[in-house]
Amino acid sequence: MRGFAILLGFYLLGTILQLGLKLPLPANVIGLILFTASLFLKWVKVEWVEEAGGFFD
């Protein structure tokens, strides 16, 4: 459940940024970029989201 909440949070953050800054990228792409950056910076652990990510396969 935590992994799904994290993924949803990044999507919502991408939506807020896209609408607030009027960026030309889709909100899901912005959220994915932020999510990927947080994985590289080790703010989010893969173990937290891999079960939720497997659900979307």
Image (cartoon, helix red, strand yellow):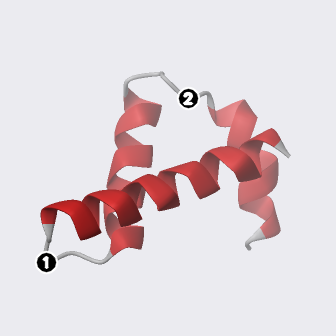
**Relative to 40, is 17 above or below?**
below
Viewer-nearest of discs 2 and 1? 1
Q: Residues within 10 Å of mark 2 (few under 14, many from 20)?
A: some
- Residue drawn at (41%, 58%) of the image: 32
- Residue drawn at (13%, 77%) of the image: 24
- Structural distance between the alpha carbons of marks 2 and 1: 26 Å
SS of the residue under disc 2: loop
Amino acid bearing label 2:
Val
Query: Could you say where residue 1 lies in the image, as x and y percent from the top left?
Result: 86, 46
Residue 43's tag is none
Q: Residues within 10 Å of mark 1 (few under 14, many from 20)?
A: few
**Relative to 8, is 56 above or below?**
below
Residue 24's tag is 1
Q: Quadrant of residue 54?
A: bottom right
Amino acid bearing label 1:
Pro
- Residue drawn at (55%, 29%) of the image: 44
* Location of mark 2 (residue): 44
**Relative to 5, is 25 above or below?**
below
